[in-house]
Image (cartoon, coloured by chain):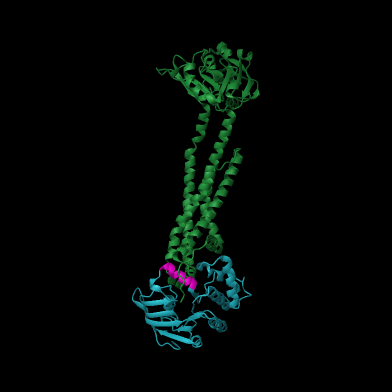
Chain colours: A cyan, B green
Amino acid sequence: MTEVIELSGVTKMYPGGVTAVRSVDLAVEYGELVAIVGPSGSGKSTMLHLIGTLDRPSRGTVRIDGHDVATLSDRQLSALRARRIGFVFQQFHLAPGRSAVANVADGLLYAGVPRKEREWRAEAALVRVGLGDRLTHRPHQLSGGERQRVAIARAVAGDPAVLLADEPTGNLDSVSGAGVVELLRELNDAGTTVLVITHDHEIADSLPRQVPMRDGEVIRDVGYVA
Amino acid sequence: MSDMSLKSARLRGPDLLRLGGTGLRARPLRAVLSALGIAIGIAAMTAVVGISASSQADLDRALAALGTNMLTASPGQTMFGKTATLPDDSVAMVRRIGPVLSATATGSLDRVHVYRTDKIPSGQTGGIGVLAAQLDLLKTVGAKLSSGTWLNAATARYPAVVLGYDTARRLGNVPAVWLAGRWWTVIGVLNKVPLAPELDSAVLVGWSAAGTYLGFDGHPTTLYTRSVESQVEAVRAVLAATANPENPNEVKVSKPSDALAAKRTTNATFTALLLGLGAVALLVGGIGVANTMVISVLERRGEIGLRRSLGATKGQIRVQFLTEALLLSLLGGAGGVLLGYLVTGAYSTTQGWPTVVPLWALAGGVGATVVIGAVAGLYPAIRAARLAPTEALAAA
């Protein structure tokens, strides 16, 4: 099996009768770089939550890195997130007043990595995203693009099977945004599976594969090779 | 796919402490203010216990200096309700009890009154008692002269008086007092006598002068003894029967050092009241911590969502916020214990007492804050852990 993400017949309904995602089938292989693209309300955020194991489907199965999410307990899902999934959010979610290294090291806390190792792995990750000279800077001392790079470093420091980026350029100007996309591409070249969720077709079209969504359904899957 | 087992990693102790401290470091003023409530409660309770313990230590020190081997015997009531007397030779009989080191007596002259001058109307007695005293009284009750001299074999036969401490303050610095129609020369003034406070408000005259000038019948009314420390209880058992062999039931035996100790412990209700106030302050402080934690959880939903996405289990979120509440109240508890100790030290220094804060009070203060922190932090921590990750992230 070579799929890191495997959704089959996945439906997510919220209380009150809203169906956010309807009968979605999706397979992403290791090493892919995929964009899930759609306007707001298309269900792409719910897709992020389902793929990121932050939420469970109402129907259908979600398999991440070979694990059927439905069979896992909260603790097991947490362990799966800690070791196999990296998240990047539109709002960065960096702790104010803490250095870049401390923020990135926090990403390894729940994987049971000892403190010293967390720190040098955090430094290595920051060097990898091009922030080797910003190790001790705090979030307010960094530009938006640099903050998102710190967040990406945090997501990849634990060497996850898949990196989920939710509107990673949403809070950035176009130059910084292009830089972040370029970084994600580089990480993908180095072997990381990357899934970008975006409403921006320009960004989506620059990636090898697009999964357009509307009204909770995948319209067509462009570039799917399997 | 990976074949690793999905076991969530345990948070190590130092990591947990650091996690619990992040919230406090992010908002130090709020942390200090909410810890202050706890600190005031703990400080109040520590100070109350400390001050009462210091007072007790001072009493123990005083009693050690005064001695706890003094017993007094005085006549009670007869079976028919009249005031009884002690036999004339009771002092001599008591002296013959083996462990008794010394025995002496005073005789109350309740029909005569002392006045500052002969001009004062006879009704204004001023509540000053007149006592006939034996010459070895001072040694036995542990009294000291503040000025002048004590009665001696000569002055005890003539109109000479020694004033008790309070009597001297009431009458003023007089060379002589008016007693039973004649002037009596003041030859000395006593200091306070803690073990025989009845002497403080008395005028002491010689045993034989009392017989000669004041119609004293020679019956002792209070008998003072000192015994070998280890035998005090044994002496106490036989004192009544020895002092008055015919009617031992008419003799009241007491131990003044016990009465002194009892007088200090009558403050217990006051102490309990203050402790109660401290407990209320502690409760309010605990509610303050709970309030702070509830707000903190609301404000930090984004952080909770992020940590869940980084792989924190519900239990790890819960324990993070619980640790934060515990640290907050421990901060208050430690500050409170320190503050309470300082207050105790300052108060007991002004009173001339030794500063004593019992270890159990310090340990109890810190222990109480741990309990309060746990109780106050539990509900907010459970709420934080129950928050769905998607909801937490959406709220940020």
Q: Position of residue A58 (x, y in %)?
A: 35, 75
| Depicted B269 relative to depicted B8: above or below | above
- Look at the image and tell me in which quarter the N terminus of chain A lies: bottom left
Q: Position of residue B233 (x, y in %)?
A: 50, 25
Does residue A97 appear in this view?
no
Q: Main secondary structure of the magenta part?
A: helix
Q: Is residue A77 magenta?
A: yes
Does residue B271 appear in this view?
yes
Instruction: Out of B32 and B112, give the one closest to the viewer.
Output: B32
| Depicted A183 relative to depicted A107: above or below | below
Instruction: Out of B287 and B94, give the one closest to the viewer.
Output: B94
Most distant residue in the top direction: B212
Q: Is residue B386 magenta?
A: no
Most distant residue in the right direction: B148
How many numbered discs sit on the rendered protein?
Answer: 0
| Residue in the picture at 51% in, 55% down | B329
What span is colored magenta in the figure? Answer: A73-83
Q: Position of residue B85 (x, y in %)?
A: 47, 16
| Depicted B385 relative to depicted B209: above or below | below
**Looking at the rendering, which quadrant does residue B118 occupy?**
top right
- Look at the image and tell me in which quarter the C terminus of chain A lies: bottom left
Most distant residue in the left direction: A17
| Residue in the picture at 57% in, 78% down | A145
| Residue in the picture at 50% in, 37% down | B267
Q: Position of residue B352 (x, y in %)?
A: 61, 37
Instruction: Out of B123 and B79, give the one closest to the viewer.
Output: B79
| Depicted B77 relative to depicted B54: above or below | above
| Residue in the picture at 50% in, 63% down | B11
Instruction: Out of B340 and B362, give the one closest to the viewer.
Output: B362
